[in-house]
Image (tube, grey):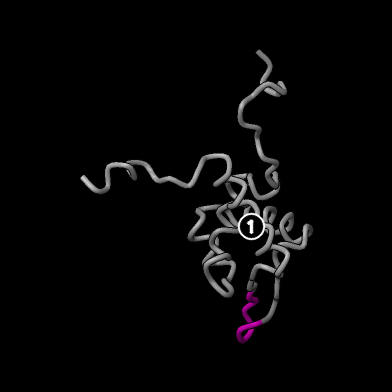
Amino acid sequence: MRANGGNSARSMPDVDRLIHEPSRYNIMALLYVVERADFLFLKNQTGQTPGNLSSHIARLEGAGYVAVEKSFAGKKPRTTLRLSAAGRNAFEDYRSRMHELFGTASPGADSAGD
């Protein structure tokens, strides 16, 4: 049986592979629920190393999903990130496609009234 055969009852929705990578998904999900976040917050929340986080942010920024603003707090550099409109739309589309794939019912939903 071929995984990509055309005989499946339910076809796999196309998902944004850039967002689908777990580290980038975490960054996008965190930025989706806040207006903006600084680099240190994202580093602490994701548990990524600074270099790894920077690499993922660069990929998201290159796609136009994340806006990066660099400034100084006194003499200390500060990097602030936010989702762009395109990033917000891409994340919402990704979530919609994943709901389509997995369904929207939560586990145990049919026994909620028992």
Q: What kind of residue is marked 1?
A: Phe
Q: Is residue 23 left or right of residue 47?
A: right
When the figure is inspected, residue 77 is found, relative to residue 63, above or below; the finding is below
Query: What secondary structure characterizes most of the magenta part?
Result: strand
Mark 1, residue position? 91
Q: Is residue 62 magenta?
A: no
Q: Is residue 57 left or right of residue 34?
A: right
Residue, x 64% and y 70% (percent of image)?
Answer: 82
Q: Is residue 1 left or right of residue 110?
A: right
Q: Residue furthest bottom?
A: 74
When the figure is inspected, residue 113 is found, relative to residue 36, above or below; the finding is above
Location of the N terminus by quadrant is top right
When the figure is inspected, residue 40 is found, relative to residue 73, above or below; the finding is above
Residue 17 image-quadrant placement: top right
Frontmost residue, 95 versus 45: 95
* Circle 1: element type: helix
Could you say where residue 54 lies in the image, as x and y percent from the top left? Answer: 67, 58
Residue 63 image-quadrant placement: bottom right
Residue, x 62% and y 58% (percent of image)?
Answer: 92
Residue, x 50% and y 42% (percent of image)?
Answer: 103
Q: Is residue 7 left or right of residue 33?
A: right
Give neighbour class at mark 1: few <14, some 14-19, many 20+ (Cα, 10 Å).
Answer: many
When the figure is inspected, residue 109 is found, relative to residue 35, above or below; the finding is above
Q: Is residue 75 magenta?
A: yes
Location of the C terminus by quadrant is top left
Q: Look at the image and give the residue range highlighted in magenta.
A: 72-78
Residue, x 57% and y 65% (percent of image)?
Answer: 32
